[in-house]
Image (cartoon, grey):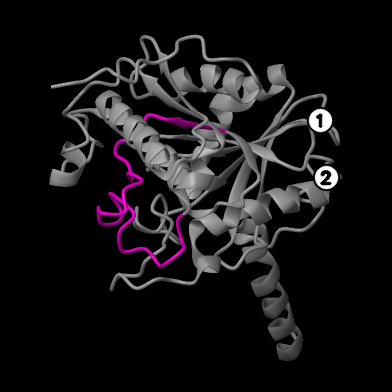
Amino acid sequence: MTDPALSRRHLLIAGLVLPALGLPAAGRAGSASDRKLKPGVGDYLFSGWSGPPIQVFYAAPDSLGPDTPVVIVIHGAQRDADVYRDQWADLARAGGFVVLAPRFDKDSFPKESDFSQGGVLDKDDKARPRSAWTFSAIEPLFDDYVHCNGSRQTAYRMYGHSGGSQFVHRFLFLTPKARAEKVVMANAGWYTLPDPAIAWPYGLKGLPAGAADPAAAFARDATVLLGEADIDPHHKSLRHSPEADAQGPFRFARGHTFFRSARDRARALGAPFNWTLAYVPGADHQNRLMAPPAAAILMGAPPEHPGDETRVFS
């Protein structure tokens, strides 16, 4: 006959162990050894910031070592960081850099305002603590990589596509001390213009005093990278609102509006402007077409196809 106490103990052990074995990576506690990367692809859980744990998908080259450059890749609205990682994996291997692609999943960051707008304001448009902004995950994520992997890197490069590009350009405005040394913003659907007279999230009005520092953003080595074929005004994920449509009929046009707004604001502030406008011929709204030229830019190559900032669209 089975000892009831023994059975209860077995059930307790099973209740503790079996769920842990069956949980996906996003539900398990990440250890330092999990975060020491090996060549190839994988994922780990990062919890070293004030917000919810974040699953990080990575791709590391065979030459991974202390001096390997770091590229942080931000996914789009589908929250498919694993897909973005996979589309960057061969580029990382060939280019000798490591890709870190954090996933801001819909369970923890359900709305676009929680993800690509940084969670800066709450539902009542009141400022949330800076430590709770999604933008505030990036610097600790980089520090954690450096610590766990013995990296000697003191700065990182950054790329965002579509909703990720929205994240990245707002990150630049609102995280002036970030160590992002090269940045590429690709094919955002709409933008926060660096205009203090336009209400957030289409402009900077309504943000906490001192939250945004456009001049610091303009001083960075940054590229607005646009697919020349990203011209569908009826694309299923393209936002249409009076404010978004005022930026242009499609993404390619809106990117020009954003670049000119940034250029003009820098002039008004008397601030250096180190941004570049560039095109990817034949590319529509697909990350896999934008990633190769973006990788080359992030590794120091000049854009193959400079953009025309004077171009206008009806």
Query: Badge 1: few (under 14), some or many (20 or more) residues near its Cα, within 10 Å?
Result: some
Residue labelled with disc 2: 149
Report whether 249 appears left or right of 310: left
Seen at 67% across and 58% down, the residue is 21
Report whether 150 appears left or right of 52: right
Element type where label 1 sits in the image: loop
Magenta span includes 9? no
Residue 154's x, y, as percent? Answer: 76, 43
Query: Badge 2: few (under 14), some or many (20 or more) residues near its Cα, within 10 Å?
Result: some
Residue type for callout 2: Asn
Q: Are marks 2 and 1 in contact (CB under 8 Å)?
A: yes
Report whether 250 appears left or right of 128: left
Q: Quadrant of the N terminus?
A: bottom right
Using the image as rendered, state which of residue 244 and residue 206 is in the foreground: 206
Residue 302's x, y, as percent? Answer: 57, 15
Using the image as rendered, state which of residue 116 and residue 286 is in the foreground: 116
Seen at 18% across and 21% down, the residue is 313
Seen at 31% across and 64% down, the residue is 206
Reply above or below: 192 against 310.
below
Q: Main secondary structure of the magenta part?
A: loop
Reply above or below: 149 against 123.
above
Q: Quadrant of the C terminus?
A: top left
Q: Is residue 24 visible?
A: no
Identify the disc placed on residue 291.
none
Q: Which of the two discs, 2 and 1, labels the residue nearer the N terminus?
A: 1
Where on the picture, by quarter, is residue 262? top left
CA–CA distance in space, label 2 to label 1: 10 Å
Residue labelled with disc 1: 64
Q: Which residues are magenta?
A: 183-212
Element type where label 2 sits in the image: helix
Residue 198's x, y, as percent? Answer: 25, 52
